[in-house]
Amino acid sequence: MCLLLGATGVGKTLLVKRLQTIFHSQDGKGNLGDPPATRPTVGTNLTDIVAHRKITIRELGGCLGPIWSSYYGNCRSLLFMMDASNPTQLSASCVQLLGLLSAEPLAEASVLILFNKTATGSDGVTYGVPLGRFDPGSLWSTACATAACHLLRHAQ
């Protein structure tokens, strides 16, 4: 089981939909097109993705943060998403991430941290790429998709 965690509104549902498109396409790239409509997850969503074998992704809504620990039991991999455009939420997400990384049931889990959305720093540099504009040809998008795919393919 792969847990997909992060604060509300960081793009977890969109990531799952993008991964489904990539893994269900013939060439493994998928024509992602415009971002699909999503709604905030209230509760949990289970999605099966076939990447050499079936991987179940359990997406937990950000509002469930206080009870995430009750889902750690059979977690083999963890995808943790952060919103790079929201400094306040980013700080809170770092605290959540530290809690996850120190949780004993997740000690053996593979972890991938994804930053979504964009943020322009005081230096005028834009950091991050939103999944809504996820371009399979760009270096960042390729790296993000490759990392997520690698984690899912090697999840136990």
Image (cartoon, grey):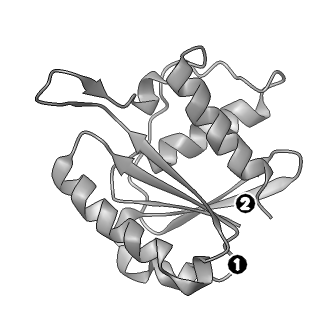
Q: Whole-percent x and y of residue 130? A: 39, 30
Near mark 1 (Cα within 10 A), the count class, few <14, some 14-19 or many ≥20, is: few
Left or right of 117, for residue 120? left
Q: Whole-percent x and y of residue 3? A: 59, 64
**Residue at 43% over, 82% down:** 67
Q: Check the image and name the residue furthest to the front.
A: 123
Label 2, label 1: how far apart the Cα atoms are: 11 Å
Which image quadrant: the N terminus? bottom right
Q: Which residue is mark 1?
A: 74
Q: Nearer the viewer, mark 2 or mark 1?
A: 1
Q: Secondary structure at mark 1?
A: loop
Figure check: 9 above or below 31: below
Near mark 2 (Cα within 10 A), the count class, few <14, some 14-19 or many ≥20, is: some
Q: Check the image and name the residue furthest to the right.
A: 52
**Residue at 63% over, 43% down:** 148
Q: Which residue is mark 2?
A: 56
Q: Do the CB atoms of the residues marked 2 and 1 lie less than 8 Å apart? A: no
Q: Quadrant of residue 26?
A: top right
Task: Please tell me which residue lies in front, 35 or 86.
Answer: 86
Task: Please tell me which residue lies in front, 122 or 135.
Answer: 122
Q: Quadrant of residue 98?
A: bottom left
Label drawn at residue 133:
none
Figure check: 23 above or below 135: below
